[in-house]
Structure formats: structure tokens, C-alpha cells
Image (cartoon, coloured by chain):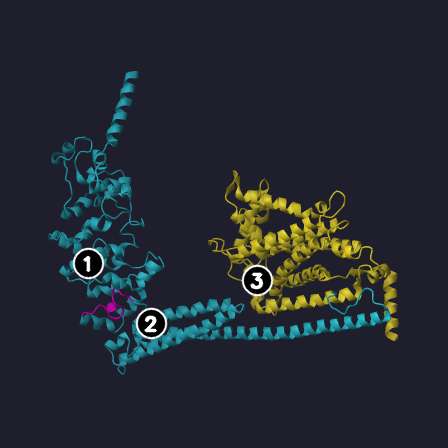
Amino acid sequence: MKTIMVASWLAMLMSICLAAKDSCVTCHQGLEGVQSDPVRKFTNDIHHRHGFSCADCHGGDPQRDDADAAMSPARGFRGKIPRTAVPQLCARCHSDASLMHKYNPRQRVDQLAQYLTSNHGKRLTAGDTAVANCVDCHGVHDIRTTKDPLSPVHPLRLPETCARCHSDAARMEKYKLSPTVLADYQTSVHWRALADRGDLSAPSCASCHGNHGAAPPHVGEVAAVCGTCHVMMEDLYRGSPHKPIFDDMGVAGCVACHENHAVMHPTPELLNSESGICANCHDAESAGGKTAAGMAKLIGELSSQIDRSKAILDRARRSGMEVSPALLRQTEAQEQLVKARVAVHAFRVDAVGAPVQEGLAITRETYTAGLSALEELDRRRTGLLFSLVAIGLTILGLWLWIRNFERKKRSLTAPVTSSGSGDPLGG
Amino acid sequence: MEVNARVSAVKQWLDERLGLEPVREFLAHKTVPKHSSTIWYYFGGITLFLFGVQVATGMLLLLYYRPTSTEAYESVQFIVAEVQFGWLIRSVHSWSANLMMLTAFIHMFSVVLLHAYRRPREVTWLSGIALLGLTMAFGFSGYLLPWNTTSFFATRIGTDVAASMPFIGEALARFLRGGDDIGGATLTRFFGFHVAILPGITTVLILVHLALVQRHGISTPPSVERQHYGAAAKVPQLPFIPNFLVRELMAWYGTLGVLGCLAALFPWELGDKADPFAPAPAGIRPEWYFLAPFYTLKLIPSHVWGIEGQVLGLLGFGLLAAWWVTLPFWAAARDGALRVRLVTGAGVALIAYLATFSFLGYTR
């Protein structure tokens, strides 16, 4: 019985030793440069953390100490994976729903299917190895989850990762693509939201082009793509007179006015009937030009009234007046301004007019509150002045009285001994 | 003549019933030493005047203030924005509290530097120190009542410091907070301290302090006493009524003018309503009179000789406070001679420490 127990312990110990043995790591960590890089990097890799080894991708037998035996094709050794084979290699696991479920039940398993529909995937299938595959974006040997800030596909790093190829003018020339997309994007409101405010939900490359199925949206799809975030603008645009016209012209709706990568912060100037974007198609005197001017005037008016009201409330607040209810009300005028800007996408003056009128009514109220606060401040200062004069006169009266009293007392009790130098502070 | 006769009749009527003659007699003969430092005698009276302002404005604020975490901020906002002269009452109350703290400190240090704590005024000194502590407690408890962000987090820091005291810290912090953290229970509790318990104790102590001042009279500094020692002319005296009293009234009026200017030109800010779930804003610090110990505790390393830094700091402050409170008892040598240089040096050093560390605590 004892012998069986010892034998089973020994067997268990041997199996643990064999399982832990990995001749790939043992040999490569002793090498130099690129030969040891994979081993060094792999310690940070998500696959390593989940117990995967070199052989799971590269094949071979890590239990063998002899390099030839370990890296024998007979034992499934594949060596460096050809670029065209990378997506299928990754998909062996990543398209296996039951396998992926063990590690992350919410992980999608359609990456390969999506990739094959992407421009990258189509070209790779056609034999163009210069296009991106899995490792170009996710890295190799040190693959991290997308939530890891060090991952090249973390939202904050994704634009630079895409730009590694898409800002390479020589490489992009072959595909007739602009190499300035990153520079353009970095001037946009989307980039500022992402980089300056750290808003990870702000759109970057994958938000509009897709990630694994990356492709430029077609002309007719652009509004839908922008509409994933800008829902109300898309709804209004679809019901506007511009939609059928842009469709007929083959122009992408949103891009026609806002650009694609260099999306700027929209200002009323955009609607200027002479220098704004509308002037590209509409004369100032045309119905379209007049609509643009009308909308610009309304928005500009509400915007300036909000600024005027804000300035007076800020002045009152800085002076120590309690104007927080008016400041709170002011935010409602700001909301109406946002609504008016959204309503521009209906391209009708009356649609913009409704929120503007509501906002103007609020700014009249808040401006009056600010004005009243400043008037109250003036009254307080006047009141203070009168009070100080009254206090000063009282002090003066007391001083004169005590001086007079002490003088009289001195004259009655000469020679001078104790009190009464006439100094009101008794010095 | 007719008027004087009526006044005399009223006096006589009151004397018969209240026995005021000895009091009048006492006040008629009461004097105040007159010398180059007489001006410092006015600060005790100014502190008393500011306490009166606090009581009066506090009672007016009570008409509208609601001591619950859901209503406190809004009720102060209502007082400031809607109630007629509410802004003035609230601002005067806040500024007066700070001025009172300042004049109380000036009064204490003038007592030290003029050596007015000497025998037989030891108990007067002790009651004064207790009043200073009560004034600080007023400041600490009142600071939370508007329930704004600054007051909320400053109170959290204050009670955290109390919690780190050895042995009693946890229990004391729990007693102050009414729970594990600052909340509605803390506000109600602080309100109770601020408007009932502290005013009651303070009023009694002020009466004791004033009675002792009357009992022993106003102290003459040793240097002035030395100048007149053996001289034909004694230390000049200023009659309390009306000479000193009228000057004191002038000082009170001046203080009222300063209060009015501060309240009207720099109204006390209300800030934003406290949000217990929000992170503490950067640079949060307690009121200026707690800045010096606060900054000192910040400078102490986390551990010194194996003892937690904050605990060591609090022990140090405890010893310093004990040393300061017992000043009249170690100020005199065994032979009864006053250690003038030692006390003056200690007073100047403490002023220098408080001024420097308060400044550093405010600016860093």
C-alpha cells in the first residue's frame, strides 16, 4: 500500500516537472537580440497569463531538450508564421466559441469573419502581404487586452497604431490613400475629446471604420455611421431637403459640411451665407442662402445673449453676490442653444427658432437677475458708506465728549495727577 | 431740576429693591492703569463685544436655518439670497467669528507679554484659556453648518486628526461624527454643540472671567511697576467710568465699522453644496486658526522612531498645550521672582511659530 502511494506521488511530481518544462523558453532566453525578444516580451502577454506557450502557435515539442527534435516539422513545428497565415492561426482559438468562453464569456468570436470582409482581409487573401493582419495592430508576443493602456489598440493609442501604416506616404501611395488622416484627425473635436479630456468613448478610427472589418463607409452610409452617436442630427438630416439632393449628387451628407477626419467644432460662422460652408452651394440671395443666414442669426443672437447674461452673473458672483439660482437657470438657456444647433440639421428657420426663443426668454430672466444683484451690491455699498459715516460721527462725538470731560476735570483737580492727557486712547 | 429729581427717585427705588449702591460705588472707584501699553487692555472688551455680535446674529440666523443634511445648504442659500438683510447677518456672523478668534489671540498674547497672568490672577488666566478653547470649538462646529464642500471636507480632516489620537481617538471621532463618517448625524450634533452646549458653558465662563477681572483689577506690567517703585508719583490711573468705558465704546464702534466693511465688501462665500460621495477637492484646508497645527502634522514623517507621525505630533501638541495652560505656575521661580525673559521668549516664539506655519499652511 505504501509502495503504491510513493509511486503515485512520484508520478504526480514527474508530471508537474514535465508540464512546467518548456525548452523554447530555456533555449531562447539564453540567446541574444531578436532571438530572445519573444521570450522576454511573452511574460506580459495575455496568452502567457492564461497558460499558453510558444508551441501553441509555433508548434514543435517543448518537452524535448534537443533543438532539432523540439523544432522538428514532424512534431508540427511551423517556425515563423507567414503573414498570410496569421489570421487563420489566431482564429483557431479566437473563432472557437466554446474555447473562448473559458477565458472570457463575453469575447466575440467573429473577428476572422469580419477581417475577411475588410479591405485589409480582402487584399491579404489576394496575396498582398503589405496590408495589416492581427499582429500589426495587436502586436506579437506581448499582446495585451484592449483595456490595457499599453496595448496598441487601447482607445488612446489606436490612432497612432493605425497611423503606423496610414501616415506612411510611400506605402499609402500604392493604395491611393491620403497619408494625412492622422494629422487631420488630430485637428478634430473628436481627437480633443479623446486626448485632452481623456474621454475613451470619443470616436477614433475604429468607431467609424470598424475594427476587424475596417473599411471606409460608403457615401450613403456616412450619416448612419455619424448617427451612431449623433442620433438626433441624423434623424433631422434624413427628413431634410438635403438628403435626397446629396444622395443624387453622390455626396456623403455629414462630410459635405463637417469634413470626415478633421471634424471641427461647429460655429455659427459655418452658416454664414457669404463665407460659410453653405455658400459653397447657395447664393446669399437664394432661398437656401437666406435660410442659412436666418439660422445663423438666431443662433448667434442666443449665443451672444447667453454670453451677456453669463458675464453679468459672473461679475455679480465675483463680487460675492448669491446668484446660484440664476446660474442654474442659465444652464437651461445653454441647453436650448444646443437644441438650436441640433435643429440646424432640419435646415429650416422655424425649427431653429423654437429653441432659440425659449433660450432668449431664459437669458432675459437671468440677465435681469444679474442686473438686480449688481444694483443690490451698489445699494449695499451706499448703505455701508452711510453706516461708516454714522459710526465715524459717533466715535468723533464720543472723543470730543471725553476730551471735554477730562479737560473740565483737570481744571477742577489741578495739579494734574492721573487721568486726562486728552489722548482718546489713553496713551 | 425736575428731571434730576425724577432720576434720583428711580435710582432710590432701584437701590431699595436691588441693592445697587455697592456696585455703583465699586464702579465709581474702579480704575485702569494708564501707561504706554494701555491700548492692549481694549482687546478683551472687543472680544466680548464680538461675542455679543455672534449671539445676536446667531439668534437671527436660527430663525431660518434648518440643521439637516438635506436642508442646511438650501436654508443658508435662502437666508443669503431671499431674506431681507439675510446676507448681512450671515456675513457679519462669519466675519465676526474670525475677528473674535483674532482678538482673542491678541488678548491672550497681550496678557502674556504684559505679564498679567501673575499671582493672584492664575485662575483668570485658566478661565481665559478655556474661553479660547471654547471659541475654537465654536469655530469648528459652526464651520460645518452651511454644509458646503469646503466645510464638509475640512470637518472630515479635523475629525480624522481627532481619530488618530492615542487611546481615545476612535471614540472621540465617533462621538463627534455621530457615526463612522461625516453625515446628517454629525450636522445635527454640531448644531447642538454650536447653539446650545457651547453658548451655555461660554456664558458661565465669561461671567467667571469678568468677575475675576473685577475682583483682582487690571494688572500693571512689571516694567511700569518698576519705573514707579519708590517714586513719589504712583502709576497713573484712568477712571473706568466714564474715561475707559467711553474709549472702549469707541473701539467697539470701530470694530463694528470694520465688520460692516468686511461683510459688505467681501461677503462670506457659500460655495457648493457638500457631496459626500465626491472626491475631496484639491488644496482643502481648515480655517486659518487651525492651519499651524494642520501644516505641522503634514510635515511630520509618517513614522518617527517607530511611532506613527500623526500620533507623535498630537502628543507634541498636547504637551505644548499643557505647558502653555500652566504658564502662570512655571512663570514664577521658587523665590517668587518672575521669569520675565523666559515667558516673553516663549510668547514671542509661539507667535512666530503660529504666524510662520499658518502662512506656510495657507500658501502651500
Tell me where the magenta segment starts and ends, as one range.
Answer: A250-263
Name the foreground residue: A417 vs A379.
A417
Instruction: Tell us which disc is closer to us: 3 or 2.
Output: 2
Q: Which mark is residue A15?
A: none
Q: Is residue B244 left or right of residue A35?
A: right
The relative height of residue A287 versus residue B27 in the rendered view (above or below) is below
Element carrying mark 3: helix
Element carrying mark 1: loop
Give the residue number, with chain letter if any, for mark 3. Answer: B75
**Quadrant hosting residue B36:** bottom right
Give the residue number, with chain letter if any, for mark 2. Answer: A267
Q: In this orientation, does residue B202 appear?
A: no
Amino acid type of the residue tagged 1 in the rendering: Asp
Q: How many marks?
A: 3
Residue at x-position 87% and y-position 62%: B15
Residue B349 drawn at (x, y percent): 62, 51
Q: Is residue B146 left or right of residue A367?
A: right
